[in-house]
Structures are given as structure tokens and as C-alpha cells.
Image (tube, coloured by chain):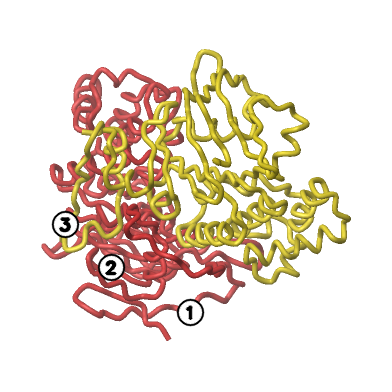
Chain colours: A red, B yellow
Amino acid sequence: MTDTEPLVRVESVSKRFPADRHAQVHAVTNVSLHIDHGETLAVVGESGCGKSTLANLIIRLHDPDEGRVLLKGVDITHLGPREIRPHRKTMQIVFQDPFASLDPRVRVGTAVIEPLKVHGIASGEAAEERAGTLFELVGLERSMLRNFPHQFSGGQRQRVCIARALALNPELVIADEAVSALDVSVQAQVMNLMLDLQQELGLSYLFISHDLAVVERIAHRVAVMYLGQVVELGPRRAIFENPTHSYTRRLLDAVPIADPHQRRTRPLLTDEIPSPVWGRGQGPELVELVEVAPGHLVARED
Amino acid sequence: MALLALNDLTVTFDDLTAVDSVSFTIEPGETLGVVGESGSGKSVTALSIMRLIEMGTRAKIKRGQAEFTMPDGSTIDLLTQNEATMRGIRGNQIAMIFQEPLTSLNPVYPVGEQIAESLRIHERLSRKSAMARARQMFDLVRIPEADKRIRQYPHEMSGGMRQRIMIAIALCCGPRLLIADEPTTALDVTIQAQILGLIKQLQVETGTAVMLITHDMGVIAEVADRVVVMNQSKVVEQGPVEQIFHSAKEPYTQGLISAVPRLGSMAGKDDPEAFHLAGTLQ
């Protein structure tokens, strides 16, 4: 590993799922990107664009059909269950629904300690001490470790999920719509927490979201996905201040702006995103990314 | 005269007060945004106006009036009407659309027939003329390929198209108030923009007043004329949209506004930045 090797490097990964006997969903097609140490890469796009599949491919919840994923220079694409295990510590994930991601019958303290035991990092009092420290880190109280998930609000539960994700000292945390289900005031508090933790622990985030206003706040770089492919990728300011691909512009134009002074009238459109389902042996045309400015890649359009 | 004057509405579920002394008015043709976080009482307020809240729940309307102005200029208190009268008002005078169009539509009937059904019930149209009006409604809500789409079933349509069908059903009898409860929350942002644009346009074309319930301050900023902010069962603050966003008086509203990510607010800044929370969120 050299100093310039990013934390994660995704090389031309594709993933297809069977739709029926004759057709496949092309969920992710030929995606390449990287995540640097300590940075937040946001992946944005609409439902079905492949952003969650991409996250699952990186964390090896899915195996790619083509391409590979490198973690700190090590190809983890073909590692077996036992070989992948030490690498799992490096990458953790927080999901959208904090109600569904915690076992209702397990005390939250136990949930946070479990990964420590599984990976043989700590047990007994040492594990409880670590769990207490993690709770304080995410703004919960130590005494809450003995509570069950239903005793927490949605925002507190998401803090529990973040504490559990941090238990193994990961370098990458994948946040898959992790703030989308939260009320706006709670969302802001959880995002502020994520920014604090990044400063304090040097975390990298893969921040998956459909909400561009949220992404603008938290991202260093942004990848825009459309029908399974990255159509624009670059520094956050380049994407938001100089959006170049027509789809990026359409997405940005659609975001309601929370300021009545900036109210716009919109043309009455009815067009919708085409289907990512293709017959066997067929597939989408591959986009060609062109670098229009340093680090700012845009898919060529006709 | 206000189209709807809600006064002191109080709704309880056993010991819990879900809506506490809520008062506001809706003028003809205007868009009133009702905004608040989960559990603040927005939907219970709407369902109380429709008199749907006491059906199959433990809810009780304890106090209040909902004075609705009928087309002939007379006013009636919706909260004291019997079910037969309310049936005549729902659909004809006040219509409602919900967040999830798939659960609001019947999966075993083609969508065209579901629009026609309302017309046959409320306007006693024949099957043939109801279908002809349904076809016109498809054009009103800008559904392309109407002749083909009218025979489709809900599962054959996208979320955005289904919500257009719901809007068509809601508007087919020409209501003067449309209550839209989180109508775009389940939709992608590009489709949300289409549906909000459509609602705005139809308001101009039909003169319908809209009560738009949402948790999304961006949606409020985009479409509301006036805003009611709710928190913990009560109205915290209400006023013109500009005033709520730019000179809110209540600490709760100030906190809410400070927590809203506003597209473009990071222009010129290289690094991510925390929210500077205000009011009650400090």
C-alpha cells in the first residue's frame, strides 16, 4: 500500500439481479470510484438507480458479477467468509430504518457489545466500558445501555446504530439513507454528530441519499447515479455549482428550496426514468466519462 | 368569508390529546401549508375536518367547530353533521389525497373505472358518460397515452402516475377544498416536482383551495401562501409563508427553520459544515 492509495477503490463493478427467466435488472453497471481517507463521498440518485446495491457491493453483502473492490489496496472481491472477516472491521454500515436495524428483544448495550465479542476485541467489563464510551461519544448516556430499543426515540435509535457501527473502530462508515427517516430537527442533530465524529476519528463516509440538500451539507465529493451508472462525479462544489450532466441539472432543478424568495415556476413535465430491466444478453449502453475539470468527470452526452 | 374556519379543535385518544385547541382558516383558492414533525397532530387535524377520525379508532372530537362555507353561501359546522350529510360533502366539497397512492387505490379495478366510480356515485352519471369524464380527467392531470392508461391496473403504473390518478379522483367532482396529506413524500424528487407543479396548475385552473400537510419545509416554501406550524398537538405559529421563513417569532419555528438543509447554502464553501441550530434546538 502506498500513501496515495485510497481507502476504497471500486473498479468497473457491475451487478445484475434476475427479474424473470428472460430478463435481468441491471442494478449497477461498470461503476468505478474511490473514497479517500477522512472524506465523505455522497452517492445520489433516485429510487432504483443502484446506489444501495453499490454500497452492498463495497461492503460485500453482494458479490459483483464483474469488477473488483479494493480496500486499502487489497482486492476483497473474491475473499472467502473467513478471509473477509478481518476486513469487515474496517467497514461498517448504518441503515435507513433504526427501528428495523435493532433487535427489539436485545438490550442496546448488548447490541453494541456483540461486534466486540464476535471479533474477539473485548468481552466482559472491558466491552461494557467500551460500549459506555461509545454511547457518550454519540451523545447518549451510559445508563441507557440497559434499555431496550422501544425505549428510545427514532433519533436516539439511530445514535445507537452509529455507536454499534463505531464499536470496531472502522475507517469507513456507510450511511445508507441513514438520516432520511428522521424528523428534520433530529436529522440536523444526527448530521452534526456525523461531522463531529469524522473530525474526531478521521472517518470516511459513503453517504447514500436521495436528498440533495442534505448531501450538499455533508459531502466532500459527490457521485450522481442514473440507471445503474455514474453520470457525474466530482468535488461537491463542482457538482452543485457547475452541474454539467443533464440528469444532474434535472435533479437539482427538482429540489424544493426552503426559501420562499427563491420560488420558481416549473414546466409541467410527465417524463419518468426508464426501466433498468433488460432481456438476457442485452444491457444499457455504457457511458463514457470525460474529465472536464480536475477530478470532475461527466458522462458524454449526444 | 373563509372557506373553512377551524376553531378550537381538540381531539383525544383516551388520555392523550392529539390535537389541542387548534384554530386556523382557509380562504377560497389559497394554499395553506400545515407543517410539523411526526406526531404533531397534522393528520389528525385533517381527518377530523373530514370526520374520518372517529371511524374505527378510539379518537373523540372533544371541542371545536369547523365552519365550512357551502356554494350557496350558507355555513355548516362539519363537526356536528351526521354521516349522511358528510357523505355528500366528502368528494363533492372536500376531497383528500394521501401519501401512499397504492394503498388508496383498489388493486383489482382498472384506474379509469375508479375515477368513473366517484362520478357515478356523486354525480349519478351513466357508466358511459362517467368514463368519458374520466378520460377528460386523465388529460387534466396530464397523464400521457390516456387511452391506453385508462384501462391499466394500479400495479402497472409508477408512483407518480398513481398519485396523478388519486388527484384525478379527488378533483373529478370539483371540490372547493383539497386536503393533501404528504402527497409527495413517497415520490422521488423529480416526480415530486411534477406533482407539486401539477397541483399548483390545477389550483389556477379550478380555483380549489388546498390544505397541504407536509413535514418538508422545502415543499412548504415552494407552494404555500400561508403556513400553520404545529408541534406537540398545538399550533405554535401561523402566518404568511415569507414571515414564517424569514421572521419567525417562536423559538420552535426558529429551530425548525435552522435545521432545514437549504440547497445552495454551501455555495463557495469547500468543506462540509454543521448546522447552526437556533431556537429550541440550541
Q: Is B120 positioned to the left or the right of A138 in the image?
A: right
Q: Residues within 10 Å of mark 2 (few under 14, many from 20)?
A: many
* Quarter occupied by residue A76: bottom left
Query: Do marks 2 and 1 share a chain?
Result: yes
* Residue located 81% across and 50% down the image: B123
The quadrant in which the N terminus of chain A is found is bottom left
Q: Position of residue B148 (x, y in %)?
A: 74, 69
Subunit ID for the residue under disc 1: A
* Residue located 44% across and 69% down the image: A29
Task: Find numbered disc 2 in the image and state the secondary structure of the residue it sits on.
Answer: helix
The quadrant in which the C terminus of chain A is found is bottom left
Subunit ID for the residue under disc 2: A
Q: Position of residue B74 (x, y in %)?
A: 67, 37
Asked whether residue B20 is in view, the answer is yes
Above or below: residue A230 compared with residue B52:
below
Q: Is A233 positioned to the left or the right of B80 in the image?
A: left
Q: Position of residue A49 (x, y in %)?
A: 46, 62
Query: What residue is disc 1 on?
Result: A285
| Cα gap from disc 2 to disc 1, whole angstroms | 23 Å
Q: Position of residue A69 (x, y in %)?
A: 32, 61
Query: What residue is disc 2 on?
Result: A239
Query: Do marks 2 and 3 share a chain?
Result: no
Query: What residue is disc 3 on?
Result: B271
Is mark 2 in CB contact (under 8 Å) with mark 1? Answer: no
Residue type of the residue flagged with mark 3: Asp
Residue type of the residue flagged with mark 2: Ile
Is mark 2 in CB contact (under 8 Å) with mark 3? Answer: no
* Residue located 44% across and 50% down the image: B224
